[in-house]
Image (cartoon, rainbow, N blue to C red):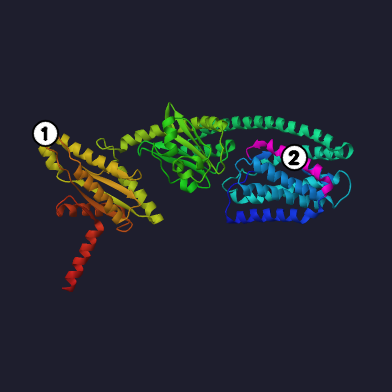
Amino acid sequence: MIPISRQGSLGLLYTWTIIFLGAGWLWKVFPQLNFDQIGTLATLIVLGILAEWLAVPFSQGYLSGSYVIVLATQLIGGGTAAAWVIGLISVIGLGIANRGNPLRTTLFNAAQQVLAVAVADFAFRLITGEALPIILFTLVYFVVNHLLVYLYLLPGRRDHPNLFGWEALRWDSYTYIFTAPYGALMAKLYGVSGILWMLLFFLPVLAAQSLLKKYVQLELSNRDLTVLFQVAKKLRDSNQPATFLDQILQECRCIASFHTAIILFWSQERQLFLPGAAQGARRQEMCNIVFTPTEGLVGQAVQSKEPIVIDDVREMSNPKDAGPFHECRSVLAVPLMAQGEVTGVLMLGDLHPYAYENKHMQMLSIIGGQAAMVLTNDILADKIQHLLATDRLTNFLHHRQFYQLVVKEMLKVNAEGAGASLLLVDIDNLRSMNSRYGHAAGDGVIQMVASVLRDITPPTDFLTRYGGGELAVWAPGLDTPAALKLAEKIRVEVRDRRLVSEEAKTPVLVTVSIGVATCPQDTTDPDKLFLGAEKAVARAKELGRDRSIAYRQIVKQIKTKITTNTIV
């Protein structure tokens, strides 16, 4: 039994085609049912449902002994009886214990098994003998059953390469090898001793499923230990944190299935959790998101320093806390701890509810500890780089680092076609303030303006100490009107905040002049972009200070003046 995930329109068409074909086949052969055997068939259905309820959970599906019932019914009542029995077993058994699967999944599982019986019955009647028809029936049923499931899962193989592979086939083939002879013996016993002895003969199948469950758990535990060994080995061999984090996610898939996964790391420079590696259906989107230390499930995991499991996102009081995992049903967030500090967060999301258990948390916490060691070293290097790259007074980037960052960002903007703006914020009359109140007061003014920028600008913006009394903002995604709106917000907020220095008995009014230049509308050259913002600031000061001006407005005024002079 294979768990089925969400599909696109083509997958839905395939799913419902199989469902209607299976239902149509049952309708067609219904008149051929032998109602004299109704008691026997009902007993077989009950046994099959019991086998499905006690199915062994497996990372890629569920293993049950229901094929015993399929083959026994085929030998007792023929293909029509076998199709109806397995159809009802699947609908009733999986419909009640559906393990979070939607109705569509239950109907598909039933329909594909009905069609597998129909094709296998055709092969069964082609040859004669005692053992050979049983072998052919089993082989055809196995192949058709898994082929239909494989076609269903084929669109998802790109994001879930291990969802339906040799391991799933190996385990399922074991059940067929052991249950096929048992089903034949059950049918033989029914013909000799009747239904009661057949019923008693089925009880060891249920006992065998319990033993198989223990064996599967043992092998999965061994696999988990192997995963830990592989992670430790890759940690020792890897010198590239990004590559190692991607390998971590790959190993996590061996422990817990996921639709989307991401490892976030703490950036000291930006005071944000940034994506270090992502996998799954929404990989591209995940690579472009950031989280604050108090945001949603990431913030909860960081604050509690404990793994957080959401069994069903739809049952959350505020589903928005799931953030980019809102389309998932189950979410697991594991803080990556090193020396008592959170250096990152590992997040997995699955389309099925109740997908994650305590064992997943424990194993992923151990793996997360390995990842945290890499992130700790990276964070230490990041802290050193941060100290070298930031201004002591404002904790903003130095001009040189800011310029290099803007150059890289402009290349991205030019390639993607998105807008971005540079805001140059010049504190008015800072030199006279230094002369009148002292340099300590001037530093206080700079820090106050820096705090305004920090409070008003979003976390995705970059801030710098551009010069003595000049600060700058790189605002991705803002065109000129939006950048001017942000500039005005900054200007008004600076005016509203009054400083009281030790030398001054009354609050000091602080104003700023702001120049705005936009990429790529104004220019695609970094030097010209900075020059345009400087010209806009200079024009703002010429007009009386305490105002915001865009470089485009200056260009427009110049063009208007030239046109007017030409007409005159």
Residue type at mark 2 is: Val
By secondary structure, the bulk of the magenta-drawn segment is best described as helix
Image coordinates of residue 292 in percent, x first then y, are 38, 39
Residue 79 tag number: none
Mark 1, Cα crowd under 10 Å, few <14 / some 14-19 / many 20+, is few
Number of marks drawn? 2
Q: Secondary structure at mark 1?
A: loop
Residue situated furthest bottom in the rendering: 567
Q: Which residue: 13% across, 32% down?
A: 502
Residue ID for mark 2: 46
Label 2 or label 1, whichever lies nearer to me, is 2
Residue ID for mark 1: 503
Q: Secondary structure at mark 2?
A: helix
In primary-sequence order, the first of circles 2 and 1 is: 2
> From which residue to which does the magenta span run?
34-59
Mark 2, Cα crowd under 10 Å, few <14 / some 14-19 / many 20+, is some
Image coordinates of residue 477 in percent, x first then y, are 35, 52
Residue type at mark 1 is: Glu
Is 68 magenta? The answer is no
Q: Are marks 2 and 1 in contact (CB under 8 Å)?
A: no
Which residue is nearer to you in this view: 288 or 376?
288
Q: Is residue 513 left or right of residue 139?
A: left
Q: Quadrant of residue 297?
A: top left
Looking at the image, is 282 positioned above or below residue 481?
Answer: above
Is 58 magenta? The answer is yes
Asked if residue 240 can be seen in this view, the reply is no
The C terminus lies in quadrant: bottom left
